[in-house]
Image (cartoon, helix red, strand yellow):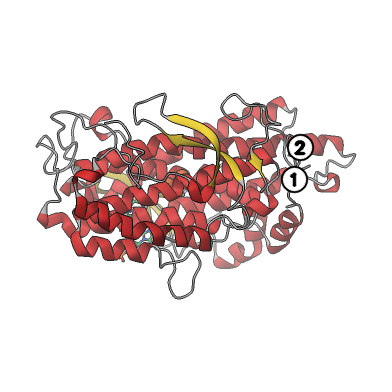
Amino acid sequence: MAINYDDRIPNNVNLSGDKRLQRALETWQPAFLDWWQDVGPEGFQKDDVYLRTAISTAPGGWAHFGHVKMPDYRWGIFLEDAVPDRRIPGGDHAGEPVWQEVPGEYRNTLRRIIVTQADTEPASVEQQRWLGKTAPSMYDMRNLFQVNVEEGRHLWAMVYLLHAYFGKDGRDEADDLLARRSGDADKPRILDAFNQPCPDWLTFFCFTMFTDRDGKYQLGALAESGFDPLARTCGFMLTEEAHHLSVGELGVERVLRRSAQLTKLDPNGDARAQGGIDLPTVQKWISYWFSYSLDLFGSELSSNAADFFGAGLKGRWNEAKDFTEHRALDQYYRLPVVKNGSVVEDEVPLRNAMNEVLRQSYIADCQRVVKRWNAALEQEGTDFRVSLPSSRFFRRQGIYAGHDFNREGDLIGSEAWQRQQDEWLPSAADRAYVASLMHAVTEPGQMAHWIAPPRKGINGQDVAFEYVRHA
Ligand code: BYC
Ligand code: FE
Ligand code: FE
């Protein structure tokens, strides 16, 4: 259905056909805008930003580009078109017609999944709130704000589901989504990574590379849901997500290129002496955010995950397309586990390993990007290569949490961990150094010294285009 921009809340769900729902969402709208003003991008609410807006949910031509003030962005509710005669892709109900209403027996579980997904969206906006003030270029600043407004829209996408399908409980949850705050001691966001500070742009690029990519895989799993409104909502969110991931991938690549160039330039091979970020430091940021994002998949062994899959609420990545056996019963998964102080392989029921199955799809995707980064480093004429640590390294959720592993995934004692963690992860001194490089560059086309320029601008514009006009 075409997007209706005449309504106060743009939508393609015929919102004006359901006055009660429309009124409820119009009541939530000012609260959302207050939240955006309170904890959204600090200091740039009056500026004109070159943003894309969805005009259709059809593949391809969905975007319109133009300068808008962020608070005037048309946040709305956009679902992918329904697939006629769609069937539940996986689990106990595989092959049955999808649900258009919430099945009573799964109501609480489904609400919890939607609330968890929803909670990450405003959390990321809060985490990135201060970054506009130190943007390495106007091009980067624009990308930050594009990501921010779209995460705001993802919140709208989930709040629509809560309001439309979960009655009073759903409305209460929607209110709570604006009450929690990233990093707050009393009302933190739900998942760990979304309470971590994002104080510098290397973090922003790693976050959009690794943490937004968890979003890609979780949304992919929910796009395989038997609850059709959720599947269609996540389908369209995935098309927006692609840009966030490219901001992260290309951002890290530009830092790597510049670091390699400055390393070569310096007589002692010291990029820091040239005012850049040295390659080992970039590696530490990569390791940190990769590991934190692995935690977002939940435990390797999870009865929740088995229930979600069995109920048909979540699928595997490309469940309908890539698998032929959709029940995953009487099948086993080989998983390295810690037993009596060493790592051994165990066979576990496949359904209980669904978090790990999704995590492995994610890791393969990250590896593809790492290969491209290393190709860029090779092009820059350096021998340095970046890599992903073992998925057991530095975990705080799941079966490896509470044990100390090195980057290769071997068990080491806590003493060895204490001694070596600063070689593997950002130290306080590394963080202070990277923070010291963060200064706003506001001349269009100019770049901060520590990052290479992008190859091309946005929507066919020059890199030197005036992406943000200050009021
Ligand atoms: N931090 O069986 P377990 C995105 C909790 S990102 C804190 O291991 P389960 C985005 C868990 O809740 C995508 N707590 O895990 C990206 C449970 O608590 P309760 C977000 C955690 O339930 C960037 C307990 O530990 N979407 O869109 O199988 C920018 C044991 O649970 C964590 C989703 O997450 C953690 N990391 O799976 C903007 C999809 N991990 O119930 C946006 C919806 C686990 O005992 N969420 N716990 O109190 C889910 O499907 C599941 O909640 C999870 C966890 C996959 C996250
Ligand atoms: Fe999102
Ligand atoms: Fe995102």
| Label 1 to label 2: alpha-carbon separation | 7 Å
Residue at x 27%, y 59% (from the top left corner): 112
Residue 468 versus residue 289 in the image, above or below: above
Q: Which one is in front, 203 or 459?
A: 459
Residue at x 53%, y 42% (from the top left corner): 146
Image label count: 2
Secondary structure under the numbered disc 2 in the rendered image = loop
Residue 201 versus residue 415 in the image, above or below: above
Q: Left or right: where does residue 398 sit relative to residue 72?
A: left
Q: Quadrant of residue 458?
A: top right
Q: Which residue is mark 2?
A: 446
Q: Which one is in front, 324 or 393?
A: 324
Query: In the current view of this chain or complex, which residue is farthest to the right?
Result: 267
Q: Left or right: where does residue 238 sit relative to residue 64?
A: left
- Name the amino acid type tagged 2: Gln
Query: In the current view of this chain or complex, which residue is farthest to the front?
Result: 6
Residue 290 visible at all? no
Residue 412 versus residue 15 in the image, above or below: below
Q: Which mark is residue 78?
A: none
Q: Which residue is mark 1?
A: 441
- Name the amino acid type tagged 1: Val
Q: What crowding class fits label 1: few (fewer than 14 Cα within 10 Å), some (14-19), or many (20 or more)?
A: some
Q: Quadrant of residue 241?
A: top left
Q: Left or right: where does residue 76 sit relative to residue 422?
A: left
Horizontal and vertical percent position of residue 67 = 57, 38
Q: Are circles 1 and 2 on residues that touch, CB within 8 Å?
A: yes
